[in-house]
């Protein structure tokens, strides 16, 4: 119902805002199509503000959405993306502002397609299909190259001509298939499986010229991606040009920016290899020549040394030194023996001077009892006792008899042997003091 107002009966601002809010709330939830003109995304904020505009009519509307709704869009939307917003119109009376509170945001056209590809990309990456550790090395010189490309395409011509220009002997197994359209995925997958089973194919190239995102969709198909991942033969992706990047580039063992670049990657350039061989031979020759020159200089230096120039001189000097040392050793030994002989003679003289034998040689004798005790006093013996007497010339036995000193002495001097005994007996009958005499 229309609101009746006049100059005399105006409507207060609050009442007007309430009426607008009530009218807007009756619109209910709607779907709005537009292009994102502005994104206000503050770090840590729970609400995202968008400006949605219609480029044809130059109209715009503010959109608010919670952060979790905005984060569902993978990859994140950017300015210029076309989206469809499902939400509820809201009027804020206190600020007098109108906004569309979004409950769901979807991409439209190419944006939605890219979102699906991004979701598939993240899922395959989580499975490990893009890990660098799964990549296989390409052979240096493949025996045969498998090529999957379109029929009579420029990509096929680029690969074949550039590869043969680099290495004329390279052989190809070409499989012409549909590279776009509904049958492209199945045909490329079948050709890949066939070439993977081929016993002579060492590397497989999947080549196609550039195109739109929709044209390159078969090379981001999950079936083809998994077939390439399971392939035992190294696979090279040569799809489109440098900006084009289908998922095949991520799972392939090598990504070539163009079909021409693929030809450069799979076979070596014979001219470059010959140049490398020539340079390697030159470096090897220089290294060997330099080593020979250095060894020749070392030999010349060795030969110029006195020890090699006159080798017998060193032997002669060593022989002279040996003779001199031998003479010195002989003289030293003789002097040492002479000194030790003199010392020995002196010590021998001392020993002889201190020896009891020297005393015996002067006419003294040592008297011992039958028990071996040395007689020092006369009362140690008794008449008739057998004693041993040792003189300088040897030892003999004697019997003790009492006798006078004078008679015994005369008898000992005049009568040897048994006569001395009788003289000793006579001497004992005198009145002189008793002394012991031995013979």
Image (cartoon, grey):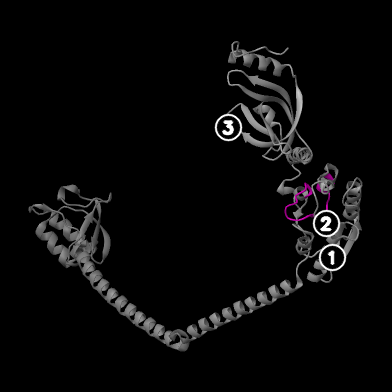
Residue 266, given in percent of the width and then of the height, sits at 78, 62
Q: Quadrant of the N terminus?
A: top right
Residue 90, given in percent of the width and then of the height, sits at 67, 21
Query: Is residue 143 shown to the viewer in this render?
Result: no
- Marked residue nearer the N-terminal end (1 or 2): 1
Question: Disc 3 marks which residue?
Answer: 42
- Badge 3: few (under 14), some or many (20 or more) residues near its Cα, within 10 Å? few
Q: Which mark is residue 160?
A: 1
Q: Is residue 381 magenta?
A: no
- Name the quadrant containing residue 292: bottom right
Left or right of 175 in this view: 303: left
Distance from label 3 to label 1 (Cα)? 53 Å
**Element under label 1?**
helix
Distance from label 1 to label 2 (Cα)? 11 Å
Q: Quadrant of the C terminus?
A: bottom left
Q: Which residues are magenta?
A: 226-248
Left or right of 100 in this view: 252: right
Question: Disc 2 marks which residue?
Answer: 207
**Element under label 2?**
strand
Query: Is residue 345 shown to the viewer in this render?
Result: yes
């Amino acid at each position: 119902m229309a609101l009746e107002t006049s100059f005399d009966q105006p409507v207060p601002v609050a009442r007007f805002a309430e009426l607008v809010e009530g009218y807007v709330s009756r619109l209910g939830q709607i779907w709005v199509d537009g292009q994102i003109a502005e994104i206000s995304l503050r770090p840590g904020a729970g609400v995202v503000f968008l400006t949605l505009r219609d480029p044809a009519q130059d109209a715009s509307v503010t959109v608010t959405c919670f952060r979790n709704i905005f984060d569902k869009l993978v990859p994140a939307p950017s300015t210029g993306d076309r989206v469809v917003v499902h939400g509820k119109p809201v009027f804020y009376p206190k600020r007098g502002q109108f906004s569309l509170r979004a409950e769901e945001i979807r991409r439209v056209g190419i944006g939605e397609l890219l979102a699906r590809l991004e979701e598939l990309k993240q899922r395959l990456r989580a499975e490990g299909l893009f890990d660098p550790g799964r990549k296989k090395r390409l052979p240096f010189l493949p025996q045969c190259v498998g090529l999957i490309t379109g029929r009579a395409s420029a990509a096929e011509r680029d690969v074949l001509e550039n590869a043969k220009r680099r290495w004329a002997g390279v052989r190809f197994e070409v499989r012409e298939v549909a590279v776009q359209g509904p049958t492209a995925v199945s045909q490329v997958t079948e050709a890949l499986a066939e070439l993977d089973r081929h016993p002579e194919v060492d590397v497989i190239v999947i080549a196609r010229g550039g195109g739109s995102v929709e044209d390159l969709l078969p090379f981001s198909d999950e079936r083809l991606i998994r077939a390439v991942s399971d392939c035992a033969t190294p696979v090279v992706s040569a799809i489109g040009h440098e900006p084009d990047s289908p998922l095949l580039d991520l799972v392939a063992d090598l990504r070539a920016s163009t079909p021409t670049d693929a030809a450069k990657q799979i076979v070596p350039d014979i001219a470059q290899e010959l140049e490398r061989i020539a340079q390697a031979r030159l470096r090897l020759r220089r290294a060997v020549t330099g080593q020979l020159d250095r060894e020749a200089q070392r030999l010349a230096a060795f030969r110029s040394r006195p020890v090699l120039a006159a080798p017998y001189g060193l032997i002669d000097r060593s022989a002279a030194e040996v003779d001199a040392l031998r003479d010195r050793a002989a003289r030293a030994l003789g002097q040492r023996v002479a000194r030790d002989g003199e010392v020995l003679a002196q010590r021998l003289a001392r020993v002889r001077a201190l020896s009891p034998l020297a005393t015996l040689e002067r006419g003294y004798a040592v008297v011992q009892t039958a028990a071996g005790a040395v007689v020092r006093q006369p009362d140690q013996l008794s008449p008739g006792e057998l004693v041993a007497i040792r003189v300088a010339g040897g030892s003999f036995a004697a019997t003790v008899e009492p006798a006078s000193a004078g008679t015994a002495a005369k008898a000992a001097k005049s009568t040897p042997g048994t006569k001395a005994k009788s003289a000793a007996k006579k001497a004992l009958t005198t009145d002189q003091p008793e002394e012991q005499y031995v013979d």
